Amino acid sequence: MRFLLILLCTSATFASDPKPIPNQAANSEIDLSGAILIVRNDIQLALDGPDLPPGYIAVRMKVAPKSDMPLRISPDDFTLLSRKDGQRSPSLSPHQIAGGGTVLVVKPAANQPGGDGTTAHGPVWGGVSVARKNTSNNDGGEASVHTSTAQEDSPLLKVLTEKSLPDKEIKSAIEGLLYFAVDGKLKPKDLSLIYQGQAGKLVIDFK
């Protein structure tokens, strides 16, 4: 009987522990929910026709504040993390995707800090993935350089801007797209979205 009582208490304890909900994260100030768009057809549907260049994916994001106080939200609050190989990509602005320039995405070496995807790395500049070049960072990790000569009046730039998650103070829920550069074939279960902004820090695991 004593063993049965202990077993029941243990089971109740584990049952009461909250489990992370895939594609969602929340705290006392904010609710986040997202859907990762990797399949090209899904991205085209989200953009009403256009597609992102190879090497880029999107996340459809919904942000809902939990208080009446204004909450500052920005695409800069979000970073995409690959748990598979340690890649980290900050959210890219539409101009960085379709306005021309260069993007640097670093994959940390497995034996270096950040190789498990736990630390930030590398600068980012604007650009679209038209050409790629592999190099090395000082820590032994691989850096993928993306370059572009896209025009300022690109139709894609206009669409990406219209669909992007706004950068502003909010008092009610908003939706929009976030854009990220990735190298290699990744599945949603390989990826996490890190939010670090005015409402604190949260992590969304995708499924």
Image (tube, helix red, strand yellow):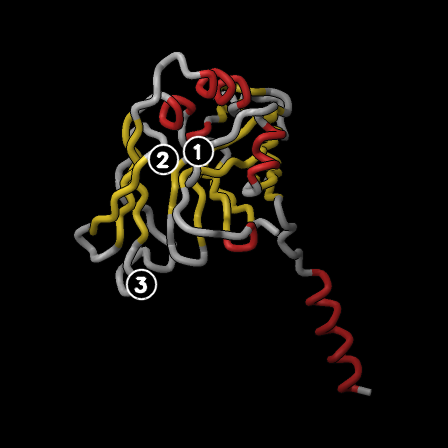
Kindly identify the residue that appears in the image at 34 percent across and 34 percent down: 130
Q: Residue at 57% of width from left, 42% of height from top?
A: 39
For discs 3 and 2, the disc positioned in front in the rendered view? 2
**Which quadrant is the N terminus positioned in?**
bottom right
Q: Camera-side residue: 13 or 61?
A: 61
Q: Tell me the CA gap for discs 3 and 2.
A: 25 Å
Which label's residue is closer to the chain start, 3 or 1? 1
180 to the left or right of 100: right
Would you place residue 54 above or below residue 66 in this image?
A: below
Q: Which residue is mark 2?
A: 129
Q: Is residue 25 above or below residue 85?
A: above
- Secondary structure, mark 3, is loop
Is residue 29 visible in this depiction of the protein? no
Q: First in sequence, mark 3 or 2: give its number.
A: 3
Residue 198 image point, x, y percent = 46, 31
Q: Which residue is mark 3?
A: 110
Residue 53: mark? 1
Marks 3 and 1 sit apart, C-alpha to C-alpha, by: 28 Å
Relative to 185, residue 50 above or below? above
Question: Which of these two is toward me, 8 or 188?
Answer: 188
The answer to whether mark 1 and mark 2 are in CB contact below 8 A is: yes
In the image, 53: left or right of 138?
right
| Near-viewer residue (85 or 114) | 85
Q: Mark 2 is on which residue type?
A: Ser
